[in-house]
Structure formats: C-alpha cells, structure tokens
Amino acid sequence: MAYSDKVMDHYENPRNVGSLDGDEADVGTGMVGAPACGDVMRLQIKVSEEGVIEDACFKTYGCGSAIASSSLVTEWVKGKTLDEAATIKNSDIAEELALPPVKIHCSVLAEDAIKAAITDYKSKQ
Amino acid sequence: MSVTKPIYFDYSATTPTDPRVAKKMCSFLTMDDGLFGNAASRSHQYGWDAEKAIDEARNNVAALIAADPKEIVWTSGATESDNLAIKGVAHFYKKKGNHIITSKTEHKAVLDTCRQLEREGFEVTYLDPQESGLIDLNKLEAAMRDETILVSIMHVNNEIGVIQDVAAIGELCRSRKILFHVDAAQSCGKVAIDVDAMKIDLLSMSAHKIYGPKGMGALYVRRKPRVRLEAQMHGGGHERGMRSGTLATHQIVGMGEAFRLAKEEMASENERVRMLRDRLMNGLSDIEEVYVNGDVEQRVPHNLNISFNFVEGESLMMALSDLAVSSGSACTSASLEPSYVLRALGRSDELAHSSIRFSIGRFTTEADVDHAIKLCHDKIQKLRDLSPLWDMYKEGIDLSTVQWSAH
C-alpha cells in the first residue's frame, strides 16, 4: 500500500514523541486502542491555568497511519484551548493525511485520544 | 524513496522465475521457434512436439515426488489443485460419507474450499495445531469417523514454515481407508517427497514457489489404489477428464524445468539457504523480546517467522522498506485480525501483530542478510522508542492485566 507524503513525513520524523508525568495535576493522559487490534495510542497534554494546551506529546504502537495521526494531533492541539482541541474531528485528520478508507480507524483513534486526554485532565481539577 | 529495489526476502510468497526456466519457456511461444502447437493436435508435427515437451515436463514433476507421470494433472496453480482435490473427492465420494478433516492453519485455498463444502452440507473438522504448529496425531485420530472421506493437511505451512509429519498422517489415513490430500505448495523442492512412502493420495503443487512461472500448478492423483475425482472444469476431456482446457505448453515446460532443477539442486541449495537463515536468526536473537514463531527444528530451511514484541508489524515493514518481507499483522485489511495461523498456535494478538516473515531463496546473498540484520536492529529500537507498550513493559506492567478500550 502506498502512503501519502504527509504520512511518510510524520512517520519518518514524528513530532513530539515522548512522555509527560501523568501524575501531575496539569497533565492529561489519553490512552486508547488495544494491542489486540494492532494499535495503541498514548497522547498527553500539559494545560496552563488559562486552559490552554501548552505542550503535547505521544507514543504510538501501530501502523504508519496511526503513528502519523497521533504525531499530527500533537501539533494541532498545542496552543489550543481545551474546548478548541475537543472540536478536532477524525475527518480533519484523515483529510490532512490523505488516509485511505482502511486507515480511517487510525484517525478515529487519534480523535478519541484527544478526548480521553481532555477528560483525564478535567477529572483531576 | 530509494531508487534501488528492496532486497527480496519473500520467497514464500513467490520466487523469481529462474533464468534457465524462463529461457526454456520462451522457446515454446513463437512461430519462429515452431513449438507453439496444441498438444491435443494429434494430426501434425506441431501437436506432437508440444505433447513431447509436456510429457518430459510431466516426468520431471512426477520424479520430484516419486510418482508415476500418469498421476500428474496440470492445473493453474496450487489453489486450483486444492479445489479440485477437495471438492472433487467430496463430490465423488459423498455417498460414502460427508465428513472432512483439516486444520486451522491450512492455506485459505483449503479453508475456503472446506467452507464452501460446509454450505453444501458436508461436515468439516478444523483441528487446532499444537503451539509448535504441528498436528497432534492423537487429536487427528480422535476426529476420524466412519463417515470421514478425506483428510487435508499441508506439508509445509506458508507462514511459519513448519513441516508436518505427513508420513505418519498418511499411515493413519490409510489404516482407516480415508483419502489423504496434502497441499505441498510450500514443500516441493524444499523437502523430500515420496507419495508412496508417505501414503499420500492427492498432492497439490505450484510452479511459482520454486522458480517456475505463476499461473501453473499440478495435482498428483493416485492411481493404485485409484482415487476418483469429480471434475470441476468441464470441456475437452483433457487430463483424463479431470481438468479440461488446452494445455499451456510454455507454462508446463517451465514448471517441468523448475522441478527438474529443484530435484538436481535441492540438497546443496537447502544447505546454503539454511546457513543464511541461521545467520539471520542469530543476528536478530540478541534483540530483546524476540520470539520465533513455529517449531525451530521441524521447519523448512528458508523460513524465519519472528515476532518483535511491542512493535507493530506494518510499521516495522514500513521501517524496513529496504527489505521485501511480509507481516502477520493485518492492519491493512479491513478486518484488523492478525494472522489466523499465529493465533491458532496460541500466540497473543500483540505477538501476532508484531510478526515478520523472512523467506530466503536461491538469489539471497550473505550481504543481503547482513544488511537486514543491521536494519532490524536500528529500526526496532526506533519503533520501540515510539511504543507506549514498550514503555509499559520497561516499567514492569503486565500488559495482559491492562483494561484496553477495544475499537
């Protein structure tokens, strides 16, 4: 299967790979997917007192499209408020990366990861 | 993108046609060579020449499996051979019984054919292999009934390369007067086959897995005691009525030549290929958390199926784009189901999703293997640095205790 240039770029040079301390009150962690399905994403956000995402990072076990989707959303959520970040749709991700139909679930997972991270952050406040 | 082609490590998927085979095939096509005739034309030289070439190919194919040339039926490939053997026997012997036994790790050409027969009213038992990939003979015997008409077990598994003890299975089937079909697409030219000694009644073969052309195969059908088949392809009554259609002389000649070369060179080639495979296996064995899938001893020399835990197979294949390999992960398919073969061995989903099959062949070099080893070391480290599962493993978390949100 041929990957789009954007997927290849994120895959070859993933942005914001890493971890934040999930125990900190200003960090939200979203872990979605399952090893049995072949993809697990962990997205973490660090939120300022004003409710703005000032840092984001990820680690992903999964195919190239899953890695690219999560890499892309770390770029997108940075500088956004929680409410803004929550409006990111999987279709935006799929469109940006030109994902083929069999890879749409990767973008769904990335959207879920954002929502899960936000939920986790809010539950700590 | 690199300009050079990736190094080929997928000989179990298909092989390049050997140049000696291709050269011979080319001489059976054009007017200039004059060997394009229809073997069924009995009235002129063109037909006789084609028939002679086909007879020679039939002898070569029969010789590799110690059969009589009259027992070889040409087909379009192992998939057709499997269909003809299984449906042909089922339809012919349905008054005798309606039960068939096979295993869960068979090729889809066997499994899907059996599913079709189930829809037609036959009963099929799908045996679970052991963790090694090998069939438990006791389980096989226990599954046999009075109504069992056919056992279909592959000789060598396409994904994990394990070699079944077909002689023991043949013995068991013969003692119960049950016909025994063997899918030998992956074993011809790799493992010695003797259809009499192994008590095999039907055996499927493919040309393109052993340096012959694609679109060409054969089915061995035992004559003594005679095995009957209901034809699946009707027409001119070719191949003693079992498979009609004008014989593809150049394809058949190619298969014959490939099988002749295989018989001649099998011993030396196996030794060379085994050396390369072991070099690859040893070179990868110092990576943490690697698992060889399938029995290591009872295995063809050219196959290495290996799981790199916590790294997903498809992303690994992307990382290894310099290498043409295949993966047991099925992220590319809509189903998201990992390899059914690895699952049937009891491998966890994670390990099945993390598997890569290397298959080595006639044109693989030591330098190819060394390049692959280095690349795997580099890329697996890179992907593990990206993997949350690897983090969790390093933190000592047992992944089987985690509540995952399946999707």
Image: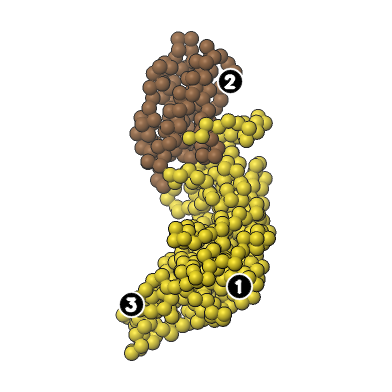
Task: Say which residue appears at 34% left-offset and 81% top-offset.
Answer: B37
How many discs appear?
A: 3
Chain ID of residue with mark 3: B
Chain ID of residue with mark 1: B
Chain ID of residue with mark 2: A
Viewer-side residue, B364 vs B233: B233
Q: Earlier in the sequence, mark 1 or mark 3?
A: 3
Q: Are marks 3 and 2 on the same chain?
A: no
Callout 3: SS:
loop
**Label 1 sits on residue:** B177
**Label 3 sits on residue:** B30
Task: Say which residue appears at 62% left-offset and 48% top-offset.
Answer: B346
- The residue lying furthest to the left in this view is B31
User: Is residue B186 in view from this perspective?
Assistant: no
Q: CA distance from mark 1 to mark 3?
A: 48 Å
Q: CA distance from mark 2 to mark 1?
A: 67 Å
Q: Are marks 1 and 3 on the same chain?
A: yes
Q: What colour do you see for chain B?
A: yellow
Task: Residue A35: give x, y in percent of width and height.
Answer: 55, 37
Task: Residue B67: give x, y in percent of width and height.
Answer: 56, 78
Q: Which amino acid lies under the numbered mark 2 shown in the image of this protein?
A: Asp
Q: What colour do you see for chain A?
A: brown
**Label 2 sits on residue:** A21
Which of the two marks, 3 or 2, is nearer to us in this view?
2
User: Is residue B180 in view from this perspective?
Assistant: yes
Identify whether A80 is placed above or below B68.
above
